[in-house]
Amino acid sequence: MELRRYWGLAGVVCVGVGVAAGELLAALLSPSDSPVTAVGQVVIGMLPGGTKEWAIHLFGTLDKTVFLTTMVVLMALLAAAAGLLERRFRGAGLVLVGLFGVAGIAAVASRPDTTPPAYFAPVLAAAAAMGLLAWVRGRFLSQGPGGARTPQRGGLPAAQARPTSRRTFLAYMGGGAVIAVLAGGASTLFRQAAVAVADVRAKVRLPLPAKAAPPIPADARLDVPGISALVTDPNNFYRIDTALVVPAVNSDSWTLKVTGMVEREVTMTFAELLAKPMVELYVTIGCVSNDVGGGLVGNARWLGWPVRELLAEAGVKPGADMVLSTSTDGFTAGTPLEAMTDGRSAMIAVGMDGAPLPLVHGYPARLVVPGLYGYVSATKWLAELKVTTFAADQGYWTPLGWSALGPMKTASRIDTPRNQGRPAAGPLTAAGVAWSPTRGISAVQVQLDGGPWQTATLAEALNKDTWVQWKAPLVAGAGHHELKVRAVDGSGTVQTADIAPPAPNGATGYHTVQFTAA
Ligand SMILES: Nc1nc2c(c(=O)[nH]1)N[C@H]1C(S)=C(S)[C@@H](COP(=O)(O)O)O[C@H]1N2
Ligand SMILES: [Mo]
């Protein structure tokens, strides 16, 4: 009896530590996806409609708590069962724990807005629980049928050694329980901070733009399967930042400061910012780390207040040539003052595709500067703009070997056919996107198997700051092929063929795909 209890306890503690570790990882990586809540959501979704309604009415506002408590109790029972199963059939308990993990992964996958990091949590949870259970079995629990392993400590008779082993076992289990509770509590705190901001964000009403982006012309989109969407889905928009935990910045207490070489320092609240005349602009932003043909680039409709108007309110003193922007988490970017004040509509963005900025993209406010790589311009969770000089200050990445100046290079990408793809032999349509923010794209050309450069069809551009879709009809006979693309910018300059790595100021070269027509 007693021993059975130990196996059950081992199951509960090991699974508890695993799940708590997973929850903590999830809270840090992607606060909106808790594996436990995801499983709960799936279970609720599977309840018959009437039951669901009934449960919600019965539990009232407590429904979530009651539901989650029930889930935790059920999980503990299953975990105890896994421990007991492991006692009877070595490895079977581990398999059961592994199945919990699979259920967690499936639940996370079923969420509409799942991000790749969300999968780490259930995987970690299952692996940790299985590893711990296997270890506890080997260290403390019986390997023979039904009996306790009785270590021969210093030659003591088994009867005397067992209590020591039991005490150690219970101490380990107690320690495990404490770790599980602490990790679980910490994950709740992290999540609540983020979720509270999510609530505040959900209540934000963005102002209408004083100057709206013109509607997207029908000819701006090419209908080719596999081509990048003209406007990137915010959920698929690349994310790059140094933040391990997504900053949860409460817009109710957030302020933006303008400091440094100004006539008067300015501090403004989010409400004051939202009251400014906003512009709306499609801008393609990209990361300097993007490889040729890579995905660290995206196009969005940004709503924001022109930085130049804020700087005018502050009054820039002569001699300044840089604006050092700082985020709430300490990241900095050094942007040429000129890029913030010339005609290009650098903005303090508060909206992305018609909604407040997603937390990962800088809620409540970020910078968007057309034509500059993100690392020198696109500060998310913006807190301060310091007007200064390149001589006096540098942004986060500059001392780490990246250029102080980061103008985006003209680039083009083949979205289809895919590299290593196997399209049908015969006629096919190659397609992709090309961008040269601030300069625009005047032409795209493709080259098949080293032949002549052929002019692709360009979709209508939204403006000079966004990428443009292109397509080119090709005929590819059966066999292996190589396709290259290059763009010509708005000033007539052909994209350079020189191959350069991302560091220190952006990759160059022609995107090339290999494919086999069959
Ligand atoms: N606070 C903060 N803002 C940041 C960064 C960062 O590390 N921290 N990275 C920058 C870089 S390198 C890029 S490419 C863009 C990416 O913006 P996105 O994640 O919204 O696509 O954000 C910029 N803003
Ligand atoms: Mo970047």
Image: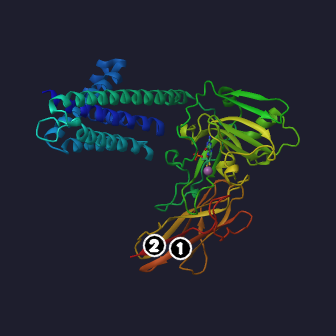
How far across and how far down the image is residue 118, in percent? 42, 42
Residue holding disc 2 = 515
Which amino acid type corresponds to the residue marked 1 in the rendered image?
Leu
Classify residue 191 as left or right of residue 406: left
Give the total number of marks visible in the rendering: 2
Residue drawn at (46%, 30%), measured in percent from left and top?
191
Q: Is mark 2 within 8 Å of ligand 1?
A: no
- Colour scheme of the rendered structure: rainbow
Residue holding disc 1 = 483
> Ligand 1 sits in which quadrant?
top right
* Label 1 Cα neighbours within 10 Å, binned few <14 / some 14-19 / many ≥20: many
433 over 257 or under it: above or below: below
Element assignment for label 2: strand
How far across and how far down the image is residue 136, in percent? 26, 38
Quadrant housing the N terminus: top left
432 over 182 or under it: above or below: below
Classify residue 467 as left or right of residue 343: left
Which amino acid type corresponds to the residue marked 2 in the rendered image?
Phe
